[in-house]
Image: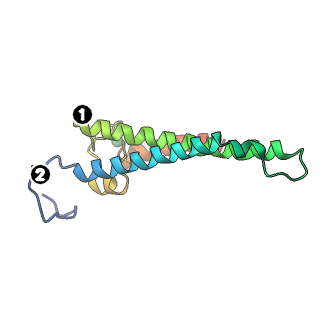
């Protein structure tokens, strides 16, 4: 009972594990990402992409490959985000949501509000990000 977290006016259910708001925003995010992936997929498969926008002809293929590459990168990012959201939803179902995957400490609620799909506490996330930075820069 510390005054650190924002007090909620209503508390009809048990006070301990009320992750409904996180579940809802995660489900919304899940839907949004799935829709985006479908859009990407449609863009990749669209026939007019193959025809290109005319021009001198010759470097068209290069341009097309470049934007395909960008799109594929975005798809990869969206897929990764979707997987993270899916994991978080799974953790809610299993009753282990809000617990750091790395050290088992509870993840601060403020952090979950900012990032509902967070699987790690701030400390472990920082460690991971430091490790990932080198990967991202490649
Ligand atoms: Zn941790």
Q: Is residue 65 visible?
A: yes
**Badge 2 residue CB within 8 Å of ligand 1:** no
Q: Earlier in the sequence, mark 2 or mark 1?
A: 2
Find ligand 1 in the image and state its quadrant: top left
* Residue for point 64% across, 39% down: 45
Q: Position of residue 12 (x, y in %)?
A: 8, 55
Q: Which residue is mark 2?
A: 15
* Residue for point 10% across, 58% down: 11
From what the image shows, is residue 11 above or below residue 76? below
Q: Nearer the viewer, residue 65 or 128?
A: 65
Q: Quote the CA–CA distance across marks 2 and 1.
A: 18 Å
Q: Residues within 10 Å of mark 2 (few under 14, many from 20)?
A: few
Q: Quadrant of residue 88?
A: top left
Q: Secondary structure at mark 1?
A: helix
Q: How many marks?
A: 2
Quadrant the C terminus occupies: top right
Q: Residue furthest top?
A: 94
* Residue for point 50% across, 45% down: 129
Q: Which residue is mark 1?
A: 94
Q: Position of residue 79 (x, y in %)?
A: 50, 39
Q: Coloring scheme of the render?
A: rainbow
* Residue for point 36% across, 42% down: 119
Left or right side of 106 for 130: right
Q: Position of residue 137 (x, y in %)?
A: 64, 45
């Amino acid at each position: 009972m510390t005054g650190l977290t924002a007090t909620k006016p209503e508390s009809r259910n048990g006070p301990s594990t009320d992750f409904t708001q996180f579940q809802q925003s995660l489900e919304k995010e899940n839907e949004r990402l799935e829709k985006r992936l479908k859009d990407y997929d449609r863009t990749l498969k669209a026939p007019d992409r193959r025809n290109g926008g005319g021009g001198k002809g010759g470097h068209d293929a290069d341009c097309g490959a470049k934007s395909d590459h960008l799109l594929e990168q975005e798809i990869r990012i969206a897929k990764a985000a979707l997987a993270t959201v899916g994991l978080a939803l799974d953790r809610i179902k299993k009753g282990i949501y809000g617990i750091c995957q790395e050290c088992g400490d509870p993840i601060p609620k403020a952090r979950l509000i900012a990032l509902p799909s967070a699987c790690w506490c701030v400390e472990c996330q920082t460690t991971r990000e430091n490790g990932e930075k080198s990967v991202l820069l490649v």
